[in-house]
Image (cartoon, grey):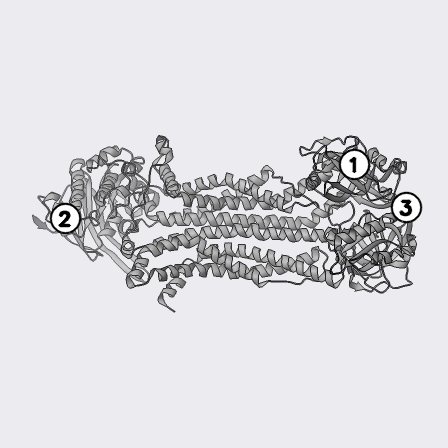
């Protein structure tokens, strides 16, 4: 494992998926201004498995939201390929999320009135070249529980449905916000295995937010944030599999 | 103030818009309740006071002519208290500047006295004095309608002689609180009036010196009205008595009694709808509030608040909300009740109005408010009480859904995921969906009531004057005369067609049931009066048989083929038995019809008529009226077209206002139910919808899931809503049915369409407001927070 300064990490420009430059984000919370991001420069590369690590309030979720087209920065810009997300309209951001981004939430956010298969289908029905919902669910090891409603699934199973839902549209990027945050370690590992498998087999650029430093060992690159700034970028030459993580 | 109470006030404030919407519905229910009941009580109290103070008679009788010496024999009838004899005449009047026929009743009054019974309430001018022959007191409404003041003159044909009368004042009488001319359908103060004249000149004009043709009496405390009437009828029979009747059958009193009964109906139907809707709204809003406060409830319980304290907390919140609505409703109700009572004072000629607000009315309103509050929220509050603290601390588990019936039938491939979500959501909460449908249906039904009244009146008039009575005017003779008199009418320039008719007062009896009305003799194949059946086909009266108004047949419980006993109360006073031949559909009054010559034969008279129906050329209308007024044998003229116009003018504003109010109420219920349901659904499914937005769904696609459900429920609600509307209208029609008039249950397509339209527009407006909220779904918060 080697540690480098951000500027020394080089890859070819055409492989850049996200180009983040000088991004700040200021929230008005009542009468207080909260500086969530204070000038971030970052590139994310195709097929890379990145982990954003930081304590709560470090700005990692804000960054992920901006990358996912849920929020726009106060200053600076974010390029997705050649598309400038900073100046996109609501409609363009919706289309961006629809065709390019897969989301996995900490609390799964499944639709309770739809079965596992249908929760995936709800996304594949609006995507351009999706995989079959059944295929996506098999990828996360849930081929047997297709017709179960969320209320009939465990937390880990619900989160794997959420991952299947996120990847079924064959997104270019997969953004996960604390995907194991609500799970115990054993179930967490199953979920992380699913994420790593997707990343390796489909080559989906993946960014995962966590405050659990142990998980960082499975990433290609670990980006540490604190107080709205990137404090450290760490490259793993030999990422571990989730099963090897000591948690 | 305790912290938990501060919490209650803050929450009430935070939900102020929804609270206001609910409070408004409660205000609507309570105020209509208070208004209707206090108006009924006021009207009742006013009427009783007026009757008592002005010695309104308890038995009334008309006759042809009897000597005053008969009074002693009347006084000897057990149960009779005070007696007043009068001379009453039906006359033609001529008011300067008013061309239409005007008729009136001229009633004798003792000199310098308001009378012994049925005392007049003098509003201006003075009482009648002896020695001044041609002075009259006018009924206030008639005086106002023509702007007649003391000193003004009007001309009258009194027993064939033209006289000029001088107005000396105007007055009201308990006998004419509701005034309606003979043969007329509605009060028309321009074309019919009541006048009082001194006894002497009136008696002289009608050859009634030392005699009378009308007597009214009061009873002693132990006096029985029916016994007195029977004895009085025996006494008056030789003097041409046409049958005495009790106060309850007196026309003005009956209309007032009917009005009181209808107000009581209003006091139940509308508040029930409002309170039902209020309970529904409370249910959805409070259930949601409690489910959002699971963690707070858990915390309160963890701190040691008892189940009772937690339950009480939410109950207090609800009662506070309902209390505000109830008290505002009581205030509004009193204000509306006073306004309504004053309107009644004007519409019914009452000299004063005593506003009565019984404490029990207020107490009932408060109790109903509390009941509604508890009924609407008991389930939700109980759920809060029951929640164990540990369970409440955890987020609510995912809602349990199942595949719907439609899908189990294998139809799911026809529906997209969002559509399936709609179906499953409806099916998962069937009660809530049903309640929403019921609320919207109620709104739809309420809306139909307003338009129904207009449509019913239109139909009554169309049926009565467009289809049944086809003449332009009716000329009523002073005395029955030979049918030859028709020639002089037919020869008047401008009269296109004239048809005589015979009308006699009679008592109709079948088994032990009897009814006093008139028997009309109609020429067979009459062109100016047609009897119609329910399908609006003309009925031919069979020779020798009698046709009854359908309502009268029901009252007497008589079927075709049964023998009806007719006791004629005029002329030879014969009693005959005639087969009942069928019924005719009539909405006004109840009558019996026979062929003209059959009636003449039963009366053992020649070809005699009581008056004539005329069809006249509009261009000669004025000339015809003028000529008729000059004919001594014609006592009065009833004209239809302008009377109907006048009636519409009088009620148009009221009707428009009523329709407007009913539409507004229906619309606000529809809006309240739909908007609140959407707001709650948005709040409940906020997270789900925001997740879909994050996943790349457009706002319209997300809106479809939320609004599609409400849209579907709205569409489902409309057909039962129209049924409820039909039921409400049918109930009103049924409740308003009397022998005076029946309200036809006529509901045109336009009424259904309008109600459905208002519901749809209300839901579109609500959807528009929700659409704006959907723009602000917090997608970021969804990623982080659990519900």
Location of mark 2 (residue): A215
Chain assignment, label 3: B
Location of mark 3 (residue): B632
Decide if residue B518 is on the left or right side of residue B657.
Answer: right
Gap in Å between the C-alphas at discs 1 and 3?
A: 36 Å
Location of mark 1 (residue): B577
Gap in Å between the C-alphas at discs 1 and 2?
A: 108 Å
Residue A195 sits in which quadrant? top left
Q: Nearer the viewer, residue B404 or A203?
A: B404
Q: Can you tell which of label 1 and label 3 is closer to the viewer?
A: 1
Percent position (x, y) of residue B369?
49, 57
Chain assignment, label 2: A
Q: Can you tell which of label 2 and label 3 is closer to the viewer?
A: 3
Q: Nearer the viewer, residue A151 or B650?
A: A151
Percent position (x, y) of residue A177?
23, 48
Percent position (x, y) of residue B590?
73, 42
């Amino acid at each position: 494992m080697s540690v480098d300064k951000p500027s020394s990490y080089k890859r070819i420009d055409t492989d850049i998926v996200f180009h983040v430059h000088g991004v700040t984000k200021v929230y008005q919370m009542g009468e207080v201004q909260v500086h969530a991001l204070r000038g971030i420069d970052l590139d994310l590369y195709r097929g890379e498995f990145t982990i954003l690590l930081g304590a709560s309030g470090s700005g990692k979720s804000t960054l992920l939201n901006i990358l996912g087209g849920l929020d726009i920065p106060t200053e600076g810009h974010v390029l997705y390929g050649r598309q400038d997300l900073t100046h996109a309209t609501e409609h363009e951001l919706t289309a961006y999320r629809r065709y390019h981004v897969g989301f996995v939430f900490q609390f799964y956010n499944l639709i309770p009135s739809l079965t596992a298969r249908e929760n995936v289908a709800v996304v594949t029905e609006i995507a351009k070249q999706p995989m079959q919902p059944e295929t996506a669910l098999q990828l996360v090891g849930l081929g047997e529980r297709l017709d179960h409603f969320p209320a009939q699934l465990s937390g880990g199973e619900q989160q794997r449905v959420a991952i299947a839902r996120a990847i079924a549209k064959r997104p270019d990027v997969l953004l996960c916000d604390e995907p194991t945050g609500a799970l115990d370690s054993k179930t967490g590992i199953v979920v992380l295995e699913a994420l790593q498998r997707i990343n390796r087999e489909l080559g989906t650029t993946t960014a995962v937010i966590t405050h659990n430093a142990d998980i960082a060992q499975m990433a290609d690159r670990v980006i540490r944030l604190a107080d709205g700034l990137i404090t450290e970028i760490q490259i793993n030459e030999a990422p571990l599999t989730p099963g090897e993580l000591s948690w | 103030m305790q912290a938990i109470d501060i919490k209650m006030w803050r929450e009430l404030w935070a939900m102020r818009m929804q609270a206001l919407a609910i409070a408004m519905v409660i205000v609507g229910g309570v105020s209509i309740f208070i208004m209707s009941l206090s108006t009924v009580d006021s009207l009742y109290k006013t009427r009783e006071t007026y009757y008592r103070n002005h010695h309104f008679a308890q038995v009334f009788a008309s006759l042809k002519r009897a000597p005053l010496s008969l009074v002693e024999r009347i006084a000897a009838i057990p149960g009779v208290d005070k007696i007043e004899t009068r001379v009453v005449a039906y006359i033609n009047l001529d008011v300067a500047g008013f061309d239409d026929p005007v008729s009136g009743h001229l009633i004798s009054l003792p000199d310098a006295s308001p009378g012994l019974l049925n005392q007049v309430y003098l509003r201006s001018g003075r009482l009648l004095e002896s020695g001044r022959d041609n002075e009259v007191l006018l009924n206030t409404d008639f005086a106002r309608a023509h702007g007649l003041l003391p000193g003004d003159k009007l001309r009258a044909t009194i027993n064939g002689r033209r006289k000029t009368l001088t107005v000396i004042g105007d007055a009201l009488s308990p006998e004419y609180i509701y005034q309606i001319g003979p043969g007329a359908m509605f009060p028309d103060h321009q074309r019919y009036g009541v006048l009082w004249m001194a006894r002497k000149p009136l008696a002289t004009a009608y050859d009634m010196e030392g005699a009378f043709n009308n007597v009214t009496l009061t009873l002693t405390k132990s006096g029985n009205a029916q016994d007195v009437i029977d004895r009085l009828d025996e006494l008056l029979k030789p003097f041409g008595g046409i049958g005495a009747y009790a106060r309850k059958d007196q026309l003005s009193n009956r209309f007032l009694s009917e009005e009181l009964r209808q107000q009581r109906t209003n006091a139940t139907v509308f508040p029930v709808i409002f309170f039902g809707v209020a309970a529904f709204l409370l249910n959805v809003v409070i259930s949601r509030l409690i489910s959002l406060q699971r963690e707070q409830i858990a915390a309160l319980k963890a701190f040691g608040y008892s189940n009772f304290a937690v339950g009480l907390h939410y109950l207090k919140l609800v009662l506070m909300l309902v209390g505000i609505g109830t008290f505002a409703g009581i205030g509004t109700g009193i204000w509306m009740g006073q306004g309504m009572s004053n309107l009644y004072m004007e519409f019914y000629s009452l000299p004063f109005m005593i506003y009565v607000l019984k404490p029990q009315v207020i107490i009932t309103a408060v109790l109903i408010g509390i009941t509604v509050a508890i009924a609407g929220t008991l389930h939700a509050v109980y759920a809060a009480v029951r929640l164990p603290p540990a369970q409440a601390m955890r987020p609510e588990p995912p809602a349990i859904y199942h595949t719907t019936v439609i899908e189990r039938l294998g139809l799911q491939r026809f529906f997209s995921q969002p559509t399936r979500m709609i179906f499953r959501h409806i099916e998962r909460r069937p009660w809530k969906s049903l309640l929403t449908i019921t609320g919207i249906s109620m709104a739809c039904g309420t809306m139909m009531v307003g338009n129904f009244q207009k449509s019913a009146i239109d139909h009554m008039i169309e049926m009565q004057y467009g289809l049944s009575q086809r003449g332009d005017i009716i000329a009523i003779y002073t005395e029955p005369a030979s049918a030859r008199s028709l020639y002089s009418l037919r020869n008047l320039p401008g009269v296109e067609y004239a048809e005589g008719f015979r009308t006699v007062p009679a008592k109709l009896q079948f088994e032990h049931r009897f009814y006093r009305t008139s028997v009309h003799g109609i020429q067979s194949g009459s062109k100016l009066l047609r009897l119609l059946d329910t399908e609006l086909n003309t009925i031919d009266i069979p020779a020798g048989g009698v046709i009854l108004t359908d309502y009268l047949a029901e009252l007497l419980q008589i079927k075709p083929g049964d023998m009806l006993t007719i006791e004629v109360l005029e002329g030879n006073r014969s009693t005959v038995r005639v087969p009942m031949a069928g019924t005719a559909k009539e909405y006004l009054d109840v009558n019996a019809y026979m062929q003209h010559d059959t009636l003449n034969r039963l009366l053992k008279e020649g070809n005699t008529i009581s008056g004539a129906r005329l069809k006249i050329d509009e261009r000669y209308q004025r000339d015809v009226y003028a000529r008729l007024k000059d004919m001594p044998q014609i006592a009065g003229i009833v004209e239809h077209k302008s009377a109907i116009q006048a009636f519409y003018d009088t009620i148009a504003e009221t009707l428009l206002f009523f329709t407007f109010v009913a539409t507004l109420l229906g619309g606000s219920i529809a809006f309240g139910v739909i908007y609140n349901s959407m707001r709650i659904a948005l709040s409940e499914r906020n997270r789900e919808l925001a997740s879909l937005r994050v996943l790349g769904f457009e706002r319209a696609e997300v809106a479809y899931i939320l609004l599609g459900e409400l849209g579907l429920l709205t569409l489902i609600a409309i057909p039962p809503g129209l049924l409820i509307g039909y039921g409400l209208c049918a109930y009103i029609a049924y409740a308003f049915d009397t022998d005076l008039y029946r309200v036809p249950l006529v509901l045109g397509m336009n009424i259904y369409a309008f109600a459905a339209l208002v519901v749809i527009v209300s839901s579109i407006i609500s959807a528009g407001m929700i659409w704006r909220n959907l723009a602000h779904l917090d997608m970021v918060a969804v990623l982080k927070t659990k519900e």
